[in-house]
Amino acid sequence: MQKELKIHDKVFELYLSDKEIASQISRLSQKVKNDYDSDNLVFLIVLNGAFMFASDFLKNYESACSISFVKISSYQGMASSGKVKFESEISVDLTQKDVIILEDIVDTGLSIAALSEKLIEYHPKSINVCSLLFKPNSFQGNHKPKYIGFSIPDKFVVGYGMDYLQKGRNLKDLYQLKE
Ligand code: IMP
Ligand code: MG
């Protein structure tokens, strides 16, 4: 793995290795399984960023569940635009389901707040968030995610599904902006 790399105009340095991420994810999925363990559960994967996290999380989650996807966008470059755009519909029946939103990172919290609000229209039994990363210092929401892999400083990250201007999603490790 590279210690440092350049994407577009920015230099990033290694922050969390794939091994550190993997062991935290197996703890996280075990915890969720212990809390629910019912086939009433629907994991809603937030595209694009959460695809890699969701894949590893769900391979570790050895119990019955349904899986669906929703595509939203809010980021422009390195800052949240403040507006959340829904780019797909929710195609699975969520009525009376326990919904767990799988996110790559919760930053301002605007995305999960907008998504949770939209999900209420589908009458689920419960809505909770499981996010690999959480930036407590930039969070502006009222409900922090129920499940968090790592709380991290307020610095831009790429890799493990997350991008900087559409690049870096395929990196298996997580990198942080070098300043
Ligand atoms: P929020 O609405 O500010 O919580 O941001 C939500 C979305 O923005 C996340 O799901 C990510 O897809 C993206 N995002 C937030 N912070 C970062 C970052 O540091 N790197 C890459 N993407 C990010
Ligand atoms: Mg995301």
Image: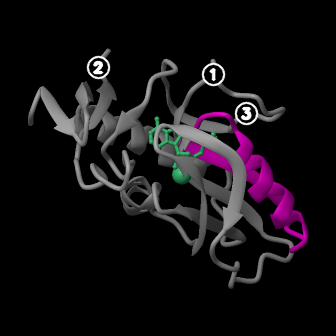
Q: Quadrant of residue 66?
A: bottom right
In the image, residue 156 sits, relative to residue 28, either above or below, namely: above
Q: Residue at x 37, y 45 (%)?
A: 164
Query: In screen coordinates, is 84 left or right of 168?
Result: right
Residue matched to label 2: 178
Q: Label 3, secondary structure: give it.
A: loop
Q: Label 2, secondary structure: give it.
A: loop
Which residues are drawn in magenta? 106-131
Q: Amino acid at mark 1?
A: Pro
Q: Amino acid at mark 3?
A: Lys
Q: Where is residue 165 drawn, in percent x and y? A: 38, 50
Q: Residue at x 60, y 46 (%)?
A: 130
Query: In screen coordinates, is 133 left or right of 157?
Result: right
Q: Amino acid at mark 2?
A: Lys
Q: Cβ–Cβ below 8 Å for labels 1 and 3?
A: yes
Residue matched to label 3: 144
- Asked whether residue 9 appears in the rendered view, the answer is yes
